[in-house]
């Protein structure tokens, strides 16, 4: 069974640009969550999607958005990038909810210059 | 807002020593998970505990969920270099769709 894949793995952008990250969940998984990981703050929850609907959103500004497609693949977008957005962005998939085993992808390392 | 405090933040020990990592909160969690993350990879689930007072063992790792479901601990017996990594606890509140993570404990086991 293929694991969670994230593309791209590494990304370098400049302030003010926007970026789109992609996450392909494990086949059959309908829930996808996104997290931002930084050395200072650890893993912080961005949002969770289930069957194309956002069920929960973390405490991030509106520049962070996401969506989920009918095949459960998910994308997140960050507009007007700031230096502080430099982080490892992780997505996790599971069957239905947080009580199921979460399978994380390897992450996308975003650097904002 | 539910918060999870992990301690210690860093731990460097010799191979063969024992260690305990703590995860504490003022909030009640309906379930708590422990993950290990290695550089360049995403976290990998080690265990999920759901019942207050529950103890689970995974080879040399022992996980405990507090009676009040507000805290948890991870004990490693006879640590090995392969145990090196970032250990994360994560909790889910009742009816929640999100996991709240602690900031992690970075463990280094020196051969």
Image (cartoon, rainbow, N blue to C red):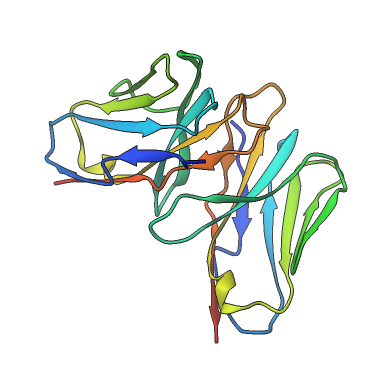
Image position of B56 with respect to A108: above or below? below
Relative to B104, is B40 on the left or the right? Answer: left
Image position of A95 with respect to A107: above or below? above
For image coordinates 44% across by 47% down, the residue present is A41
For image coordinates 73% across by 66% down, the residue present is B75
Of A31 and B13, the residue lying toward us: A31
What percent of the width, then of the height, locates residue B73? 73, 57
Relative to A47, is B83 on the left or the right? Answer: right
Q: Is residue A17 visible?
A: yes
Q: Residue furthest front?
A: A1
What percent of the width, then of the height, locates residue A29? 54, 27
Image position of A70 with respect to A93: above or below? above
What percent of the width, then of the height, locates residue A30? 53, 22
- Marker count (numbered): 0
Relative to A35, is A110 on the left or the right? Answer: left
Of A48 and B53, the residue lying toward us: A48
Q: Is residue B28 visible?
A: no
Of A38 and B27, the residue lying toward us: A38
For image coordinates 54% across by 70% down, the residue present is B84
**Residue B60 occupies quadrant:** bottom right
What percent of the width, then of the height, locates residue B95? 69, 21
For image coordinates 62% across by 26% down, the residue present is A97
């Amino acid at each position: 069974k293929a694991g969670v894949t994230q593309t791209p793995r590494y990304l370098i952008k400049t302030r003010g640009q926007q970026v789109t990250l992609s996450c392909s969940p494990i086949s059959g998984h309908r829930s996808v969550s996104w997290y931002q990981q930084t050395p200072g703050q650890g893993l912080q929850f961005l949002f969770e999607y289930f069957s194309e609907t956002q069920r929960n959103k973390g405490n991030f500004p509106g520049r962070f958005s996401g969506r989920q497609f009918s095949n459960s693949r998910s994308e997140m977008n960050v507009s007007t990038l700031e230096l502080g957005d430099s982080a490892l962005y992780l997505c996790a998939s599971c069957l239905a909810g947080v009580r199921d085993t979460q399978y994380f992808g390897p992450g996308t390392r975003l650097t904002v210059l | 807002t539910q918060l999870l405090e992990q301690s210690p933040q860093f731990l460097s020990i010799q191979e063969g020593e024992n260690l305990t990592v703590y995860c504490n909160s003022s909030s009640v969690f309906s379930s708590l998970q422990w993950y290990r993350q290695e550089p360049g990879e995403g976290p990998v689930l080690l265990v999920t505990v759901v019942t207050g007072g529950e103890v689970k063992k995974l080879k040399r790792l022992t996980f405990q969920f507090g009676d009040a479901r507000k805290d948890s601990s991870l004990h490693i017996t006879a640590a090995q270099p392969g145990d090196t990594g970032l250990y994360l606890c994560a909790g889910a509140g009742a009816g929640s769709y999100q996991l709240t993570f602690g900031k992690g404990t970075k463990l280094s086991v020196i051969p």
